Amino acid sequence: MIALAWSGGKDSAMALHTLRRRGEAVAVLLVTLNEAFDRVSMHGVRRSLIHAQAAALGLPVHEVWLPDPCPNEVYEQRMGEAVRALMARGIRRFAFGDLFLEEIRAYRLRHLRPLGAEVLFPLWGQPTRALVQAFVGLGFRAITVCVDGQRLGRGFLGRPLDLPFLAELPPDVDPAGENGEFHTFVYDGPGFREPVAFTLGEQVFREGFWFQDLVPAVGPLRPAPGRSTALARPEVGFEAGRPV
């Protein structure tokens, strides 16, 4: 059984799709969340949407809560605790959607192998433009939720990840945003029982990044005790992810 590191974005979705096509058994999605905002670290997606996404994919979520800001030693401690907890349940294989950043790959191996875990990188080495083209061609649907203000700017925020988006990227931006240029939320595609419904909320600029808030359209998950959910003002309607 496999625990898949999950951000809710395109690389996570493609990693899950790839593993399932290989006949691998993914048992749980491993998600890091910001304690201060009740959102996915870096992407800024609400926890309730991650749970809706996981439910649509038929998988449970294992949450790892991180402070804001999060010192590296705290991250390593809490991730180590999560890995040990999952290994105690018989899960010994951990997969990541990394594409080509050698330093990150080496970091994961360095911290997980001593725990006795097997580390998988199902997308490793794939050409990123071809990967995104395959993502679109398979019928996945995603929206940009975070962009680097210096590399892309606000005009790329809140847009569908499609071939026109790919064609408009500057030549120095990786087609999959592997260097952190942009992040996405996947709301439909292969393996989804139904699309994840949401509305577009406000756009916020914070610490050099633009964030697009996504507001659950129905049945939001209650915030965890002692943690707050940032409020968002719906501006553009989406029904099951389609503009209305």
Image (cartoon, rainbow, N blue to C red):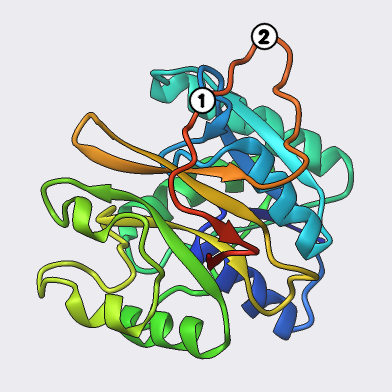
Q: Secondary structure at mark 1?
A: loop
Q: Where, by quadrant of the figure, is residue 204 drawn?
A: top left
Amino acid at circle 1? Leu
Residue toward you, 25 or 105 = 25
User: Horizontal and vertical percent for residue 46?
Assistant: 57, 37
User: Horizontal and vertical percent for residue 18?
Assistant: 63, 79
Amino acid at circle 2? Gly
Taking the spot 52% from the left edge, 40% from the top edge, the residue there is 111
In the drawing, does residue 209 fall left or right of residue 105? left
User: Horizontal and vertical percent for residue 57?
Assistant: 77, 64
Q: Where, by quadrant of the figure, is residue 211 drawn?
A: top left
User: Horizontal and vertical percent for residue 203?
Assistant: 33, 40
Mark 2 burial class by Cα count in 10 Å: few <14, some 14-19, many 20+: few
Q: Earlier along the polypeptide chain: callout 1 or callout 2?
A: 2
List the single residue furthest toward the front: 244
Disc 1 to disc 2, how far (Cα)? 16 Å
Quadrant for the N terminus in the image: bottom right
In the drawing, does residue 55 fall left or right of residue 36? right
Above or below 239: residue 104: above
Q: Dot 2 corresponds to which residue? A: 226
